[in-house]
Amino acid sequence: MRTDDKRPPMTGSRRRVLTGVVTLLTAGSTVALAAPAAADASDGSTHTIYATREGLVGHTTANGHVITENDHFVALPSTRALSPNGSGAYSVRVCAPSTGRCEYAPVWDVGPWNTQDDYWSTTRHYAADLPVGTPQASAAFRLGHQGGLDSFGRQVRNPAGIDLADGTFWHGLGLTENAWIKVTYLWQGDARTGVIHSPVQPLNVRSGPGTGYRAVGLAAHTAEVPLLCHAYGTLITGSRGTTSLWYRIGPKNWVSDAYVITGTGKPVAPRC
C-alpha cells in the first residue's frame, strides 16, 4: 500500500512515500526489541531497523537537497543527525541480509514518522523509556507505545526507522520491497575517516582490495566512511589520482583510495 502520512507534517506539497508490507515474527506474545548487532568496534553502533523507500523525486529534503532519480542518501527521524547539503558529516552503512549488499550513504533528510527520535543514541532525547536501537515508530506499531501514535499524534502504520532514497534502495541494496536491514551509525565510531569523492556515480564497494573481487555494494558521493585498515591491490585511476592503495571500510567491504579524500596519498589506517 501507499500512504503520505508517515512523514512529519510539512507545509506545501512535500510528502513521504510508503511502499510494501511488513510481516511480524513473534515468540508467543513477546516481540523482541532491537539489540546491537556484531560489527567492528570502531564503526559505530549497528541495529536492525525496518527500512522504507523514500521516492519523492523532484522534492526537497530537510537539508535543501533536491531529490533526483535514483538518488543516494538516507533519512533518519531526528534533526540531530542531519548532514548539511553536500556533506556526509552524518553517514550510515546500510546492509540488506536478503541480498548481501551494503551502501554507505549520507543522511540528508528527516523521517520517517518522527523528527526528534535519535533512537541510536545512548542519551536519546525522545521516547527515552525505550531501549537504544528501537525507533519509537517501531515500538508504536508493534507494541502500542504511546497508544500506537507518533509524536504528531498519527497512527503509525509501519515500524520504519529509516528511509532510503531510490538509488540506495534499488541499486545499493538491491531491494524490491521494504525490509529489515542492518544500519550502522558511522559518526559514532572512532576510526579515522575519509570522504568518498565519486560525483558522477556511486563508487563500487568490493569484497577485497582489487577489481578482481566482486562488487558487494556502493559508496555514495560525500559519504564519510571509516578507514579501518589498508592493503595494496589493483592500481586504480580515479577522481583523486592513481594509486594501488585500498581501504577496508566494513566487513569484507573495500574501496580504492583513488576515490577517497583523506588529506594525503599515504595510508592513514593500520595495515590489514
Image (tube, helix red, strand yellow):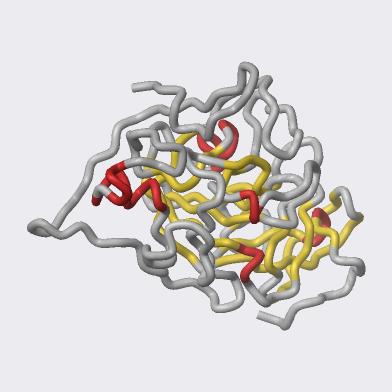
* Residue found farthest to the bottom: 270
Is 51 located above or below residue 45 in the figure? above
Residue 42, position as x, y percentages in the image:
61, 76
Q: Give 46 or 257, whichever is nearer the viewer.
A: 46
Query: Which of the 4 quarters of the picture holds residue 261?
Result: bottom right
Report the side of 187 relative to 177 (left or right): right
* Residue found farthest to the top: 13
Residue 163, position as x, y percentages in the image:
51, 40
Report the side of 186 relative to 142 (left or right): right
Residue drawn at the location 65% of the way across and 32% of the way down: 71
Instruction: Count the marks.
Output: 0
Q: Quadrant of the N terminus?
A: top left
Residue 107, position as x, y percentages in the image:
65, 48
Q: Give 169 or 233, whichever is nearer the viewer.
A: 169
Residue drawn at the location 88% of the way across and 74% of the way down: 266
Residue 197, position as x, y percentages in the image:
81, 49
Query: Which of the 4 quarters of the picture holds residue 201?
Result: top right
Residue drawn at the location 57% of the way across and 61% of the way down: 185
Report the side of 242 relative to 194 (left or right): right
Q: Quadrant of the C terminus?
A: bottom right
Report the side of 266 relative to 131 (left or right): right
Q: Give 52 or 211, whichever is nearer the viewer.
A: 52
Q: Give 263 or 151, whichever is nearer the viewer.
A: 151
* Residue found farthest to the left: 28
Is 35 located above or below residue 71 in the figure? below
